[in-house]
Every structure is written in structure tokens, then in C-alpha cells.
Image (cartoon, grey):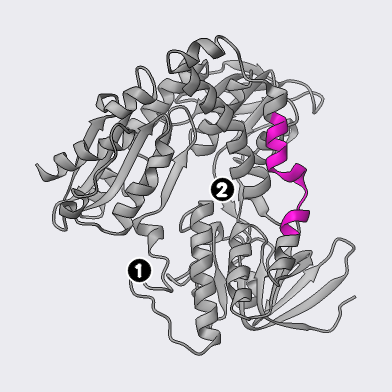
Amino acid sequence: MTSSAEEYDVIVLGGGPTGENVADRTASAGLRTVLVEAELVGGECSYWACMPSKALLRPVAALAEARAVAGSREAVGGRRLDPAAVLARRDSFTSHWNDDGQVQWLRDNGIELVRGHGRLAGVRTVTVEAEDGTERVLTARHAVAVCTGSRPVLPTGVPGLAEAHPWTNREATAAPAVPGRLAVVGGGVVGVELATAWRALGSEVMLLVRGDHLLPRMEPFAGELVAEGLREAGVDLRFGTEATALERADGAGPVVLTLGDGERLTVDEVLYATGRAPRTADVGLEQVGLKPGGWLEVDDSCTVLGVDGEWLYAAGDVNHRALLTHQGKYQARITGAAIVARAQGRALDTSRWGAHAASADSAGAPQVVFTHPEVAAVGLTLAAAEAAGLRVKAVDHDFGAVAGASLYGDHYRGRARVVFDLDREVLVGACLVGPGVAELLHSATVAVVGEVPIDRLWHAVPSYPTISEVWLRLLEGCRG
């Protein structure tokens, strides 16, 4: 049964961090806003990705860092992580997969919530199907924002894959117990992070990588150092291989993987970390002239291209600009500002770094990989900068030669690189690899996004003795 249409100023499809932030921006500007969500408010990041995975990984780093310093090393001795305590802490960070707190946050900020599956039904119109089959029709005076995110992709054509019930990131971050043997397929961020976490918790982990290196979108040395760390932790890391078939006899017992060379591996679970696809197959795109199932193409204000009237927006993973939670939230702030400006009859400022332009997506999107060692990167790699036609040079430095790093941990190993634009004399990229480098990344992000001239950066003095002193050596290389 369909009710009469309910009118709002703004409708947001998807209640993850991106959707929440769009709704917050528009509601705080006085626009009546409704958020539509079929699952948990808070989305993938809160319950199956960023928060639970980092809760699993933080104890790994903390123990490794304690073992890296004489004195604390003796205090922890040969002790291992307590899996039950780690999983309990993980559960607390997901609020035990209960979204009451996030729903209350919506209420506190004047955002209405409609539970159910939302679909576009025409211009500024959305239908919402509840679990019981009832349907509501919502209309928007100003805008609809699609913030439905992405989903894990499983390969096609692998015999026995579906019957093996493989893990994706959801099962791997929410598992109630440690598997004895775990095969991880994929050498990207999800693969290396979860291989790190489950190995530290006691699993025998095999990491199967189709290519010849890890983290292929980052500087090559990042993948090399992470591979060293995984092997030292006891991960069986295999390059140039893939599973050609899977068998799981009873749906719950061991999984047998047949590899490309004919070898057969028996594990308790298999995790596929082989990419993401947009959640757009069933959101009504065909009702507005777009093809279902694809990434939504947007301009820098996150307005969807190919739809007349400048009323449809897409922010976060769904637009494929930068599949990172923090970038989705950044796009949400831009999107919300654009919706409010248009609702108030104001022109948008979509110039580079303008108030309504998500310029950082292409110029300065930062990312941290929480392995041991950590990887922190922002902007362009050397290869990407050269491919873009920039006249650049890379400046590298060994973190172990920095006094602050040697104090941070005995025998500290790591490497830093900045990519220097020779014509503009600014940094366009940075990659830092080593224990604890995640907290150094924002300084690099400010330098890249702010396009701070090298001559001015030279006056930003790092404190002694900290790992940040690496900046002196990097800047010397840029000025030389």
C-alpha cells in the first residue's frame, strides 16, 4: 500500500558517514531533511570496515611498538594478544552492531529517519519500501543525494565459490572467533590489513596475490616493506597465484582451494578482498535516465551529470572519486554546501579549492594502511605525477637515520618519499612507511593541499627529537 507523498527539502539515500554528513549540513542550514536507510545508521564504516578493522589492528601495533623498545620489550616478553579481549573491544567500537546511538544523533540534529530501501521514482521523488512491504513516497523541494556507498566484489567464473560461502570484509571484521587457518585473496588495503590482524590473533594466514606486489596504487617500496612485515609475522605470502576452484563439502567445514599451479590448500575460512562495486543496481537510476549498477559520474560539486535540473547529487564511494570514508565525508560537506547555496538562490563557487568544489579528491586525498609497518600517503605517486605530464623529482630518506625514529623504536625501519614539482616548487605527493607514521600524514596533507612553497616549508621547524625531523632531510633534497 502506498501512502500520499511526504514533502521535504532534501532527501538523502544512505545513512553511512557520507549520508549523515550531507544531512547534517542541510539540516543545520534550516532545510527539512530526511535520511533513508535500510540497514544500520552509520553504514559500512561503523560496523564492517573502518572502525572494527582498526579496532582489530590497534592492539597489533601497540604490542609491536612495546616490543621494539628495550625495557618495555622485557615487560611484555613473549606474551601474545588476548583474542577474546581484542574481539570484545572490537565489539564495543561497533556498539555491538546496534545503531541506537547514531539514530539518536540524527534526532538531536533535527534529521528525520525513514527505515527501508529507497529508490528514485522520478524527478525529486523517492519511494521507500519497508521490511513489511509497505511503501512511502517522499518528494524533495530542492535535492536528492545518493550516498549508498559500495559493496565487495567477488570474482565470477570460479567453480565452487558461492558454495564455499567466502568471507568479504563484513564477515572478516565481524567474525566472533579466530579461524585456525585463513586464506586471504587480494593484495590491496583490505587484504593486507586483515591478514595482519588475523595473523596476530593466531590464525595461520596465507595471502594469495595475483600480481607481483602489494598495494599496487602506492609507491612500490610501500608494498615491499609491508610484504617484509607480513612475512616476519609468519604470513605465507604468495605472488603470481590465484584460486581456480573452491570446495566446501558441508557448507561449514574446511575449504579446499585449488591454485593455478594445481596445488591444493585446506583452510577454515577464505576471505576475498578483490575490489568494490557501487550500490546502485536497485536505487531507481533508470527512472532518471541513468544506467543501474554503475558508478555515478559527478562534477566537482558532486552534482550528477546527465540529469537535468541540478537536483540529483552523489557523494562518497558511489561516485568513484575516492573510496575513502574521510573523502566521502569531505564530499558530503561540499555537497551539503552546494545544496544549501542553490536552495538559497546563490551561485556556486566551483573554482579550484572553491567552497563548492571537492578539489582534494584529485589533488590531496590521504590514506593510511594500518599494517606493521604502517603506510601513509597523500597526493600523487612519482609514476602518477610523471604520467600527468608534471616535471617532478622524488626525494627519498631512510627513517632509520632520523634521531626521533631511533628513539621511537630500536632498529626502526622505514622510508619516506616526497614528490616535488620542479616548476611550481611545491609538493604534489608524499608516501611514508614505518611504525607510527599515520600521525605524520596530516602535515604532508597540509603541504600538498595548501600548495605551500618549499621556501616557506623550510621555516616550518619540526620538534627535536621526533620522527617528523624527516621533513628536514626531505626538504634539503627538494632544495638541492
Q: Is 94 part of what is drawn in magenta?
A: yes
Q: How many marks?
A: 2
- Secondary structure of the residue carrying numbered label 2: strand
Q: Report the front residue among 87 and 154.
A: 87
* Image spot of residue 227 (x, y percent): 43, 24
Residue 91 visible in the snapshot: yes
Q: In the rendered image, which residue does mark 2 sit on?
A: 276
Q: Which residues are magenta?
A: 87-103
Residue under numbered circle 1? 353
User: Is the stretch drawn in magenta largely helix, strand or loop?
Assistant: helix
Quarter location, residue 408: top left
Instruction: Name which residue type carries label 2.
Output: Arg
Q: In the rendering, at what x and y percent does residue 159 appear?
A: 66, 32
In the rendered image, residue 142 lying in the magenta stretch gets the answer: no
**Element on which disc 1 rests:** loop
Q: Position of residue 155 (x, y in %)?
A: 59, 40
Q: Residue furthest bottom?
A: 345
> Residue at point 58% right, 21% down?
200
Horizontally, is 242 left or right of 352 in the view? right
On the question of residue 166 being in view, the answer is no
Residue 371, percent from left and from top: 48, 31
Q: Residues within 10 Å of mark 1 (few under 14, many from 20)?
A: some
